[in-house]
Each structure stands twice: as C-alpha cells, then as structure tokens.
Image: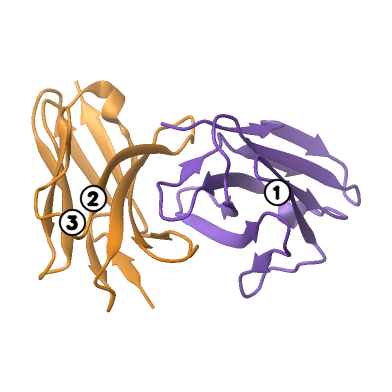
C-alpha cells in the first residue's frame, strides 16, 4: 500500500518570500503520478501541480515548482513570491499510473501567508 | 482544468430524512468518480469509488446502505445519505477523472443534520 507523509502541519511565510512544503511517499510502484492540491478557506480543492514519475524534469506552474527526487521518494513544493491568496491547506497526493485506484493523500500542511 | 459541479452546496435537514447530493463532470466524461468526507482541519477521507454502470466500491467502515451511490452516466454520480443523523453532519466532496488522468474536485456540500 502507498503512503504519503507531510511532516509540517503548519507553516507561515512573509508575503513575497519563498516557502517550501515537504512531502515524502512510500510505494513499490515504478510508474505513478504525484500531485499538490490546494484547499483555500472556500474548501474547493484546486490542482496546483502534477508530476509524472517517469519524467526527470521537475514540473513548474508559474510561481509553483516541485523538487522531485524519485530515489529518495520526496516531492516538495516551492512557492515563490508568496501572495496572500496562497493561504490554504496544501495536500500532497499519490496516484498509481494504472487502473482506477484513488488518490492517496497526505494529512496536509496549513500555510499562512503574512502581510 | 476540468470542471466538476456539486449540488447542493449546503443543506440542512431533520434527523431521519434522506439527502441526495449530485456530482457532475461538466466538460469531460469521467470513467470514475470518488466520494470523500472531510472533517474540520483534517484530510479527505475516501468513502467510495464508483465506475459508470457498476456498483460502487466502499471503503472499510463505510456503510453502503447508509451512503447510497449511483453512477448513472459518465457525467453524473449521486450520493444519498439515508436516514441522516447528526453524526452524519460533515463536508462531502466528490471528484471525477478519466483513467490515468488528473482528478478534479467538486466544490463540496456542507451537510448539517439537526
């Protein structure tokens, strides 16, 4: 079975600064996807970024980028130039590439961006 | 990204009544839909996985007769909370995806049972 661990329950960052959220996972699969989802106070789950395990290049989406270390089973999220609207719960998630298996979520990290 | 709608966004009902929540994928055909429950300040807890035209697969500890799931088409799944009680009060979220693709979430339904 797969597990996803987010070791930082809460974090805070000053506006315009950079913050990194940690995520590690455990799996015996070789082909899979990793995701970061954001859940703001509205509670709508929003996809932030997606990484395919077979790709060595780290995914980036504007101010969001990941550091994917497959051998170490690590998948951290870096948010640059933090904005007040980035305040949210962030969930790291794992999905097997084959079949219709559900996402496996970490427990989340609550990020507060301070003005 | 793809759009998933969920209706109603919030519902208040009396104990003993049944409540139906609809989940629709608006701009794609979802081979699989998922239903989650989320308690305050916690992660999402998977309740069941449903594939169009077949019976839902429930997670351990989730009563299938309590939480009825119908996946009538590739764009619609419903969750019915039967004979709701106050302990069923929660935030319910649906999600949809195609095989091997990104999973998209509905905006959630806040259920309060009095």
What residue is pinned by disc 3?
Answer: A75
In the rendered structure, the residue with mark 1 lies on which chain?
B
What residue is pinned by disc 2?
Answer: A51
In the rendered structure, the residue with mark 2 lies on which chain?
A
Tag in front: 3 or 1: 3
Within-10-Å neighbours for mark 2: few <14, some 14–19, many 20+: many
Residue nearest the observer in this picture, A2 or A81: A2
Q: Residue at x 45, y 54 (%)?
A: B43
Specify the colour of chain A: orange
Q: Residue at x 72, y 31 (%)?
A: B8
Q: Secondary structure at mark 1?
A: loop
Q: Are marks 2 and 3 in contact (CB under 8 Å)?
A: yes
What residue is pinned by disc 1?
Answer: B89
Q: Is residue B114 visible?
A: no
Above or below, comparing residue A85 to residue B36 in the picture:
above
* Residue B47 pos. (x, y %): 61, 61
Q: Are marks 2 and 3 on the same chain?
A: yes
Above or below, comparing residue A66 to residue A30 in the picture:
above
Gap between marks 3 and 1 measured at Cα: 34 Å
Q: Which mark is residue A47?
A: none
Dividing the image into 4 quarters, which one contains the N terminus of chain B? top left
Q: Are marks 2 and 1 on the same chain?
A: no
Tag in front: 2 or 3: 2
Within-10-Å neighbours for mark 3: few <14, some 14–19, many 20+: many
Residue nearest the observer in this picture, B13 or A95: A95
Q: Are marks 3 and 1 on the same chain?
A: no
Gap between marks 2 and 3 measured at Cα: 9 Å
């Amino acid at each position: 079975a797969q597990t996803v661990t987010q070791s930082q329950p809460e974090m805070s960052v000053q506006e315009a600064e950079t913050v990194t959220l940690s995520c590690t996972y455990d799996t015996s699969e070789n082909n899979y996807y990793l995701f970061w989802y954001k859940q703001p106070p509205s509670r709508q789950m929003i996809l932030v970024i997606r990484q395919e395990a077979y790709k060595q290049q780290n995914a980036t989406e504007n101010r969001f980028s990941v550091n994917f270390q497959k051998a170490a089973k690590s998948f951290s999220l870096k948010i640059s130039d933090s904005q007040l609207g980035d305040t949210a719960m962030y969930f790291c998630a794992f999905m097997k590439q084959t079949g219709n298996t559900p996402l496996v979520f970490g427990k989340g990290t609550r990020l507060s961006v301070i003005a | 990204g793809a759009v998933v709608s969920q209706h109603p966004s919030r519902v208040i009902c009396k104990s003993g009544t049944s409540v139906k929540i609809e989940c629709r994928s608006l701009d794609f055909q979802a081979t699989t839909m998922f239903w989650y429950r989320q308690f305050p300040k916690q992660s999402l807890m998977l309740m069941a996985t449903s594939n169009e035209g077949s019976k839902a697969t429930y997670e351990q500890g989730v009563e299938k007769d309590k939480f009825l799931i119908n996946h009538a088409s590739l764009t619609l799944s419903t969750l019915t909370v039967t004979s709701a009680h106050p302990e069923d009060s929660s935030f319910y979220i649906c999600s949809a995806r195609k095989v091997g693709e990104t999973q998209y979430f509905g905006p959630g339904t806040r259920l309060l049972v009095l």
